[in-house]
Every structure is written in C-alpha cells, then in structure tokens.
Amino acid sequence: MLLTDIERYITMGRNASICVYRDRVSELDIIIVSIYIIHKGDKGYGLQVVFDPVGMIDCGEGWIWETSSMALPTVITLIENYAKVPFELLENVSRTSKLENVELDLDREEVRRQNKKFINEYKGGEMFLPLLPQNVNWETRPYT
C-alpha cells in the first residue's frame, strides 16, 4: 500500500474512501470486518469500520463505526497496530475486492445464533474495534 493510494482513492474514488483491511471476524463465520480510511473535514482523516454479513459487503447491511478526525500518520499507526503488519504490506482492498464473493453454507439456525451473538455479546462489533488514542472517539456507532 502506498500513501499516494490513499489520496487518490479518497479524492477520485467513487466512495471517497479506501479499504485497507478486510478479514473474517474471529469466532463468527457470518461477519466480515472492513476498515476504510475516509476524509474528515479540513485535511483530516478518519477510520470507518464496517461489519458486513458474508456476501453483502458494501450493500448497506453492515454495522458502521466511524471515528472523529485525526492526522493521517495517526490513522496509519492505528491500522498497523490493528493488522499487526507495516502499512506498506497491507493490500488495497478497494482494488482487490478481497472476500467480496465469499459464500457460506450454514443452516438458518446457526446464522441466527451467530447474529444474536454478534449483537448481544459483541455489541455490534465493539470488541473487535481498533484502540483509539485519547483525543479520538467513535462519532458514529450502530447503537445510539
């Protein structure tokens, strides 16, 4: 991943964001977490963390968490700490579409059980979120 990718996707991309991380949520087969870098106001950046059901990435069905504004180096450090790899080794998921076409063969009862666990025990993904610095908070939450 290059820093120039961030600016190019945010200023010229169709979603004004760039997805820099995507993976399955541990313990839940039905949920995929994606982390996007977004533009936040006057030269600020933020993170948008989206938990989508398998097969429904970018379909508007996900649980969205969004941070307040911060400097780009802070955003990059948060992502590196979360992914446990240097930023340069992350893939541009907006380009590769990683896990977008995953299909899952679970019975309805198992899907219901995992969905209930995600909502009740994991609070809509809260326990899977990156740790934020003290001066940054979650502005948008799936719960109010």
Image: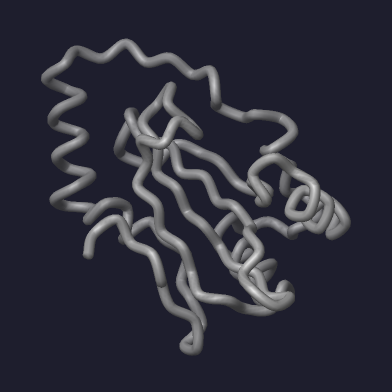
- As drawn, the residue found furthest toward the bottom would be 135
> How many numbered marks have been drawn onto this rendered protein structure?
0
Foreground of the two, 90 or 12: 12
Tell me the quadrant of the picture where the C terminus can be found.
Answer: bottom left
Q: Residue at image x 34%, y 29%? A: 29
Q: Residue at image x 69%, y 38%? A: 94
In the drawing, does residue 114 fall left or right of residue 5? Answer: left
In the drawing, does residue 103 fall left or right of residue 112? Answer: right
Q: Position of residue 53 (x, y in %)?
A: 36, 31
In the drawing, does residue 113 fall left or right of residue 96? Answer: left
Residue 10 appearing in the image: yes
Q: Position of residue 64 (x, y in %)?
A: 40, 52
Residue 65 in the image: above or below residue 19: below
Foreground of the two, 4 or 111: 4
Residue 78 in the image: above or below residue 129: below
Residue 58 in the image: above or below residue 74: above
Foreground of the two, 26 or 3: 3
Please identify the quarter of the rendering in which residue 115 is found. Answer: top left
Residue 92 in the image: above or below residue 134: above
Residue 1 appearing in the image: no
